[in-house]
Image (cartoon, rainbow, N blue to C red):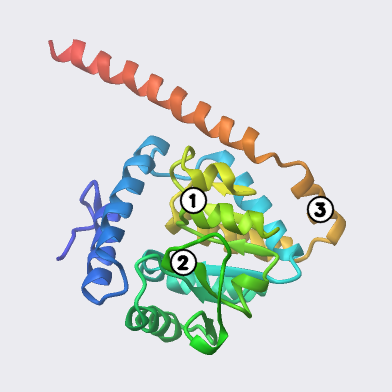
């Protein structure tokens, strides 16, 4: 489908097309379309742009990834089609490998997602070799299967578009979890160490630029950034922003209706 650039919903529609094409190529699960639509609804609440609080969340996340001894980036189908090149670049800058991990998992689909990443420029993709597979304790669904060299042995796990069950399990294993989730009230958002409430297609390019800057920071400076952050307080600020924005919008729209009458 050709979408004109001057369409008021051009960016959103183009992103939808990526997800749809990803489903047809078996990278995205059918349920991934539902997840994307739910995310779009929350993005409307943010105004479809990055709020100042999200930039702070992204900065703290990058600082933690740079300080990690063994960071890993978990990739699902939606992320693989929405921003593969960006995820690969971030991976290279912060020194965190990519690992395919899918909820709706089949060996065939794992390989298709991995191929998408390799075709996009990744040098190594973990999670697809059965000989390196192991399981996360307490999980019974397919995302329990992880790579011994990646998620299982990592100290910091970056899981864009995550599910709450695995976040909780990873925390119980003593790992620190970073997520990108447009829903500030999801289990993932509530249980992660650092929650980035933003659209992943905006968050990752912004994190790349932040990473380029923070790579020059000393360890003590990175630790100061992390220690000043409280995820619960950050989520409170997020909810306050959304509620205040909706209140202002309601007043504006009511005034428009009065003018029409």
Residue 117 in the figure: left or right of residue 148: left
For the residues labelled 2 and 3, the Cα–Cα distance comes to 31 Å
According to the picture, the residue beneath numbered tag 1 turns out to be: 164
At horizontal 20% and vertical 50% (from top left) the residue drawn is 7
At horizontal 35% and vertical 82% (from top left) the residue drawn is 112
Relative to 121, does residue 190 appear above or below in the rendering?
above
For the residues labelled 3 and 1, the Cα–Cα distance comes to 27 Å
Relative to 75, does residue 40 appear above or below in the rendering?
above
Q: Quadrant of residue 24?
A: bottom left
Nearest the camera: 214 or 195? Answer: 195
At horizontal 61% and vertical 47% (from top left) the residue drawn is 57
> Which quadrant is the C terminus positioned in?
top left
Image coords of residue 129 (percent x, y)? 50, 87
Image coords of residue 215 (percent x, y)? 74, 66
Q: Quadrant of residue 46?
A: top left
According to the picture, the residue beneath numbered tag 3 turns out to be: 223
The mark that comes first in sequence, 2 or 3, is 2
Q: Quadrant of residue 258?
A: top left
The mark that comes first in sequence, 2 or 1, is 2
Say the numbered circle drawn on residue 143.
2
For the residues labelled 2 and 1, the Cα–Cα distance comes to 11 Å
For discs 3 and 1, the disc positioned in front in the rendered view = 1
- Residue 138 visible here: yes
- Could you tell me which secondary element the residue under label 1 belongs to? helix
């Amino acid at each position: 489908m050709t979408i004109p650039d001057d369409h008021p919903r051009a960016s959103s529609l183009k992103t939808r097309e990526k997800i749809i094409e990803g489903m047809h190529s078996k990278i995205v699960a059918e349920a991934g379309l539902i997840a994307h639509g739910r995310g779009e609804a929350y993005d409307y609440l943010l105004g479809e742009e990055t709020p100042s609080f999200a930039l702070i969340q992204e900065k703290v996340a990058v600082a933690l990834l740079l300080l990690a001894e063994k960071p890993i980036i978990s990739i699902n189908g939606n992320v693989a089609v929405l921003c593969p090149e960006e995820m690969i670049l971030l991976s290279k800058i912060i020194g965190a490998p990519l690992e395919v991990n899918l909820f709706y998992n089949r060996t065939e689909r794992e390989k298709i997602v991995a191929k998408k990443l390799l075709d996009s420029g990744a040098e190594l993709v973990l999670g697809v070799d059965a000989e390196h597979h192991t399981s996360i304790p307490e999980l019974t669904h397919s995302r329990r299967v992880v790579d011994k060299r990646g998620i299982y042995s990592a100290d910091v796990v970056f899981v864009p578009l995550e599910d709450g069950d695995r976040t909780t399990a990873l925390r119980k294993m003593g790992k620190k979890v970073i997520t990108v989730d447009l829903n500030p009230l999801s289990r993932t958002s509530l249980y992660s160490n650092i929650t980035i409430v933003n659209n992943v297609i905006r968050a990752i390019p912004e994190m790349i630029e932040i990473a380029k800057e923070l790579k020059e920071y000393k360890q003590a400076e990175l630790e100061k950034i992390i220690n000043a952050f409280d995820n619960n307080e950050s989520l409170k600020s997020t909810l306050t922003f959304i509620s205040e924005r909706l209140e202002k919008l309601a007043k504006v729209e009511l005034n428009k209706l009065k003018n029409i009458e």
